[in-house]
Amino acid sequence: MTVKMDFDESAQMLKALAHPTRLHLLNLIREKHPCVRFMEESLGLAQPNISQHLSIMRQAGIVQAERDGNQVCYRIKNPRISRLLDILLD
C-alpha cells in the first residue's frame, strides 16, 4: 500500500508540472524565491493567473508560500522537484 501512495503522489506532482507556465514559474522560484509581483513582471501575466498556477502547485506539495510583510513569496518545498528541475531545465 505504501508503494501505491508514493506513485499516486508522484503522479500528482507530474500532473501539476505539466504546464509551460508552471515550469517557467518554478524556474523563477528555484533561482530567486520571488514574490508574486516579481513573477507578474517577469512573465507578463496577471496576478490571478499566476495565483491559480501557484495554487495547483501548492496543492501538489511542490511549492510553499512564505509571507514577507504584505507580499507572498515562494520556494520549492519538495527536494525531489528541485532535482527534477535540474534535469529538465538545465
Image (tube, helix red, strand yellow):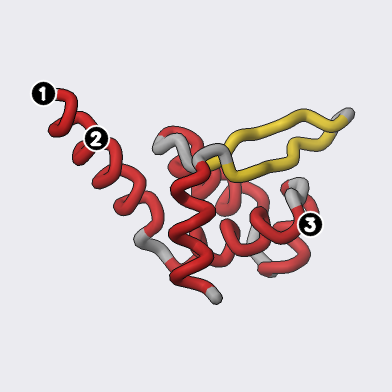
Q: Amino acid at mark 3?
A: Phe
> Label 2: how many residues lie within 10 Å, few (<14), some (14-19) or many (20+)?
few
- Name the residue that disc number 2 marks: 6
Q: Residues at badges 2 and 3 in contact (C-beta under 8 Å)?
A: no
Which of label 2 and label 3 is nearer to you?
A: 2
Identify which residue, 4 or 64, lies in the foreground: 4
State the CA–CA distance, disc 2 to disc 3.
34 Å
> Label 1: how many residues lie within 10 Å, few (<14), some (14-19) or many (20+)?
few
- Name the residue that disc number 3 marks: 38
Q: Amino acid at mark 1?
A: Met
Q: Is residue 69 above or below residue 26?
A: above
Q: Is residue 14 above or below residue 21?
A: above
Q: Amino acid at mark 2?
A: Asp
How many numbered callouts? 3
- Residue at 43% across / 33% down in the picture? 59
Q: Please state the horizontal and vertical placement of residue 46, each as a whole percent of the image.
A: 65, 57
Q: Can the viewer see residue 64 in this picture? A: yes
* Mark linked to residue 1: 1
Q: In what quadrant of the picture does the N terminus appear?
A: top left
